[in-house]
Amino acid sequence: MKTEENQEIAASKAGMDAKTARKYRRLDRLPSELPAAVRGRTRPDPFTDVWDEVQKLFEDNAGLEAKTVFEFLQRQNPGRFQDGQVRTLQRRVKVWRATEGPAREVFFAQQHPPGRLGASDFTHMEELGVTIQGQSFPHLIYHFVLSYSNWEAATVCFSESFESLSEGLQNALWVLGKVPHRHRTDRLSTAVNNMSDPAEFTDRYKGLMRFYGLESEKTQAGHGNENGDVEQRHHRFKRAVAQELMLRGSVDFAGVDEYRRFLRAMLERLNAGRSQRLGEELAVMRELPERRMESARRDRVKVDSGSLIYVDRNAYSVPSRLIGEEVEARLFMDHVEVWYGQKKITEMPRLRGRQKHRVDYRHIIDWLVRKPGAFQHYRYRDELFPTSRFRVVFDLLEEQMGLQQGSKEYLRILELAAKGSEVRVDGALRVMLEAGSEQISAKGIETMLASEHNPTVRDVQVTAVDLGVFDQLFSTQEVLQ
């Protein structure tokens, strides 16, 4: 107090609060001269008589909460314990656990040598609200992280399939340019066998690891913290994406490719600050193989009488000329290819989930026109309405002509779309519906399409260049000189 300007500064330098200093100044006594404050219980402990019972409950069930036990005591002793006494029990249980309770699980901080471990996992992204052309875009991210440098890579996918895991891991390794020594996942069913199988990992996953020379690691069941590097990066990655979306000013993208470019640019910025530690990892990592491993699963399947194949418990249509033939279905992360005789016949988006179906009307329209009666109760009839306008037209035809004749007329319209242009037919339907046409027919649409004028092509006349102009330019230059 004698050397400082005011009491606040003096108290701060003495290591005490200003109010405490004012108290000592007011009493004019040193702290050591004051009597020690006596802290103790000011009211009887209401749980003394039942504490042995409470303690036994916690010893038998370490996961019990104090509030649960308090409600149990209220049921056992009606009217004895009031709601306001729950905090008293919680405080006593907290002290008991710290002094006499069972030992708690210890988490041991690990050292990660450079280049040793890469960890990966899937994470859902719905919470960010990303949309594609205004439509919701439910998807996952396969997230790969190097444990030492925190370098990360991400691949957009739609299920936790092996194809997604394979594509995501290989994308990460080829962007990285090297291969770490080990790869860790949690207990993904696409990589780790269930407990009834004596083999630790699935055959396809072991083949992928063997191709890149990676040693496999997995976490214990119910111990997600063992894959903590990637789990923690999930949270930070999503937060970074959310921030970038705010800066962008919109969560809507024109297409999936634009969204992928957005994520790629963001990851490049995040990884730029990890270049020094990444360099240490790259120096001790192994080289990549000469080529990537194919991520697709190949299945030999037979085309049934409905022009359908069944792949991964989903149904896909193929051209009807393949009925009865055995084809090869190549199941990729996001699409399915159908091959016959070393030639790709068709390709379609991969269905998500199980017991789904995708039927292309172009594959079966020829025979539907010949068998219009099958349309009414066709199991996959809803797949035969390419746009909402086609559905509106079918309902209108059914109302005007009856179900049987309406179905025939609709199938003729659908045949025009299959053999011509679906976009042009849809446009013709739009014009007719907006004009309030009383009778929509395949013949009317065909006439409208035939009467459309082709764009006028104008003849462009290019005047021949007189090369004598260049001689005049040279002559003029000589005169000026």
Image (spheres, rainbow, N blue to C red):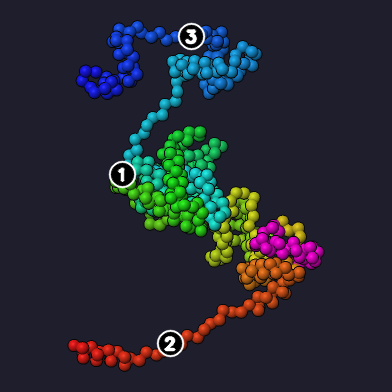
Taking the image as shown, residue 313 lies to the left or right of residue 401, namely left
Query: CA–CA distance between discs 3 and 2?
Result: 107 Å
**Residue 187 in picture, x, y percent from top left:** 50, 39
According to the picture, the residue beneath numbered tag 1 turns out to be 277
Residue at (33%, 20%) from the top-left corner? 17
According to the picture, the residue beneath numbered tag 2 turns out to be 462
**Residue 20 in picture, x, y percent from top left:** 34, 17
Q: What is the magenta range? A: 380-408
Residue at (56%, 62%) from the top-left corner? 347
Find numbered disc 2 in the image and state the secondary structure of the residue it sits on: loop
Find numbered disc 3 in the image and state the secondary structure of the residue it sits on: loop
Upstream in the sequence, badge 2 or badge 1?
Answer: 1
Determine whether label 3 and label 1 are within 8 Å by CB: no
Instruction: Kindly identify the amino acid type of the residue bearing the numbered disc 3.
Output: Thr
Which residue is more in the foreground, 177 or 217?
177
Upstream in the sequence, badge 3 or badge 2?
Answer: 3
Residue at (76%, 67%) from the top-left corner? 408
Which residue is more in the foreground, 414 or 221?
414
Determine whether label 2 and label 1 are within 8 Å by CB: no
Residue at (33%, 8%) from the top-left corner? 34
According to the picture, the residue beneath numbered tag 3 turns out to be 42
User: Eyeballing the image, is 130 above or below 70?
Assistant: below
Find numbered disc 1 in the image and state the secondary structure of the residue it sits on: helix
Q: Nearer the viewer, mark 2 or mark 1?
A: 2
Q: Quarter holding the N terminus?
A: top left
Q: Is residue 361 visible?
A: yes
Which residue is more in the foreground, 458 or 114?
458
Q: Quadrant of residue 25?
A: top left
Q: Is residue 393 magenta?
A: yes
Instruction: Kindly identify the amino acid type of the residue bearing the numbered disc 1.
Output: Arg
Secondary structure mostly taken by the magenta-highlighted segment of the chain? helix
